[in-house]
Amino acid sequence: MSVTFELKTTETQEFTFELLSSSGDMLLLSGDYPNKAAAEQGIKDVKLGSLMGHQIAAGKTPAGETFFVIKDTHGQIIAKSALFADQMLFDNALHAVKDNACIAGISDLTAA
């Protein structure tokens, strides 16, 4: 499964990124970053964090949907997954991130 980071500009001229599956489904979504360099560092942090089991945490919403987050080395959340009602879809997404985020390419959709 090939995954890709998409680096984007928000409506408020901040930067964000998503990690997309080979079929275009969103696996991870970052918060907003004040500049492109910070967002690019966030992608590097996700790539590293995806390899470190202690930087990945799973959780459940009150409605019972599951999700996971990737944290940086300081414990701050850098990206969160979609919400999953189905455990198999959750497991597949988590494995896709763990197996592929570290080697994923970056598609820069910003206006440079």
Image (cartoon, grey):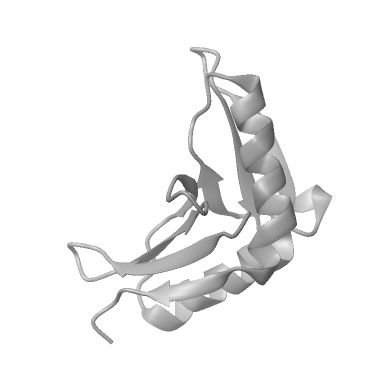
Picture coordinates of residue 54 (x, y %)?
A: 81, 49
Numbered circles on residues, count: 0
Please give left or right for residue 112 compared with residue 50 in the image. left
Locate the N terminus and report the quarter of the image it occupies: bottom right
What is the residue that sits farthest to the bottom in this orientation? 112
Residue 110 lies, with reference to residue 63, above or below; the image says below
Residue 106 lies, with reference to residue 62, above or below; the image says below
Q: Is residue 74 visible?
A: no
What is the residue that sits farthest to the left in this orientation? 11
Residue 93 lies, with reference to residue 38, above or below; the image says above
Q: Is residue 108 visible?
A: yes
Q: 8 or 13, which lies in front?
A: 8
Q: Residue at x 64, y 68 (%)?
A: 45
Q: Residue at x 51, y 64 (%)?
A: 4
Q: Residue at x 61, y 73 (%)?
A: 44
Quarter occupied by residue 102:
bottom right
Q: Residue at x 38, y 64 (%)?
A: 16
